[in-house]
Image: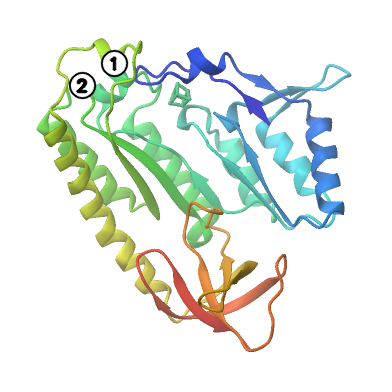
Amino acid sequence: IMYGCNNFCTYCIVPYTRGRERSRKPEDIVAEIKNLVNDGVREVMLLGQNVNSYRGISADGTQTDFADLIARINEIEGLARIRFMTSHPKDCTKELLDTMAECPKVAKHLHLPFQCGNDRVLKAMNRGYTAGQYLELVHYAKAKMGSALSITSDVIVGFPGETEEQFEDLCNFVKEVKFDRLGCFAYSAEENTVAAKMDGQIDQEVKDKRAELVMQIQTGIMAQKQAEKVGQTVHVLCDGIDEESGLYLCRTTGDAPEVDGNVCVSSEEPLYPGQFYDVLVDDSDLYDLYGTVAK
Ligand code: SF4
């Protein structure tokens, strides 16, 4: 729905390669989704480098922001689920979180990359928010959407100059927020970026060790979260069958396709792609849930 980026995080090459932000006309997006729905599509994913800085201008000159856009898409008959990715915390407004909470078709899944839990490192990254502002958004979103909300994120460890104490801040941040899923990347210098020329580049060995430590913390959090879901009934959309295992692959509102886990369902009755089912979870591993259709 939008292209490019205006943010210039110091480690990233995207604004140079993809150019400044451009948003598609809202009426074109709505028309495309209506066509997809007519072809049988039930779930759409709105994509953009910074999807929530979307600003579409209609042919009559009126402006539509991202919250307005998802409210309009929510009205499309026959569409069952709306997802979006990736949100930038700097542009994630309380109005957007209110709209997410109010629109039943919007998946209660917020992918909100925070990158670091220390303000000095965030400033060096030019991310445009503090750890405190990020936490405020998370608390607001959780208060609005409750346990239905799944929050996923990305983090970079070993940014130039990151001290042991600053890395500790990041670990404490991960423990505090308890992300549903987390991608952790060891910083890697991109040619021609500001960060690549910064002093204090960190040894690969140290970066790898830090990444491993973050993922150890996250693994513990995920194992606990997954175990807590056993015994619960979850509402899922069926994507199809895994021919090898014979299990139907389904996703909850918190699971993005091809990125997050599946709910693997065994059923003697056929399940159909594009249909919703309530599934009783009877087992879990780190990524997937397993269950049967609830009676
Ligand atoms: Fe833009 Fe994301 Fe790159 Fe930052 S990391 S410059 S927000 S694309």
From mark 2 to mark 1, how far is it between C-alphas? 7 Å
Q: Which residue is rendered at x = 52% and y = 53% of the image? A: 258
**Relative to 150, does residue 33 appear above or below in the rendering?**
above
Question: Sequence order check: which comes first, mark 2 or mark 1?
Answer: 2
**Relative to 79, does residue 139 appear above or below in the rendering?**
above
Say whether marks 2 and 1 touch (CB < 8 Å): yes
Q: Is residue 191 left or right of residue 197?
A: right
Task: Please provide percent x and percent y for residue 57.
Answer: 77, 20
Q: Which mark is residue 195?
A: 1
Q: Is mark 2 within 8 Å of ligand 1?
A: no
The quarter of the rendered structure image containing the N terminus is top right
Task: Please provide percent x and percent y for residue 157.
Answer: 24, 34
Q: Residue 257 occupies which quadrant of the picture?
A: bottom right
Considering the numbered disc 2 on the image, is that residue within a helix, a strand or a loop? Answer: loop
Asked whether 157 or 271 is in front, the reply is 271
Amino acid on which disc 2 is placed: Pro
Q: Which mark is residue 160?
A: 2
Q: Residue 183 occupies which quadrant of the picture?
A: top left
Q: Is residue 97 visible?
A: yes
Q: Which residue is rendered at x = 40% and y = 63% of the image? A: 287
Considering the numbered disc 1 on the image, is that residue within a helix, a strand or a loop? Answer: helix
Task: Please provide percent x and percent y for residue 83.
Answer: 62, 48
Q: Is residue 118 left or right of residue 150?
A: left
Task: Please provide percent x and percent y for residue 205.
Answer: 12, 35
Q: Residue 243 occupies which quadrant of the picture?
A: bottom right
Amino acid on which disc 1 is placed: Ala
Instruction: Work out which residue is located at the far front of the displayed protein and give it.
Output: 244
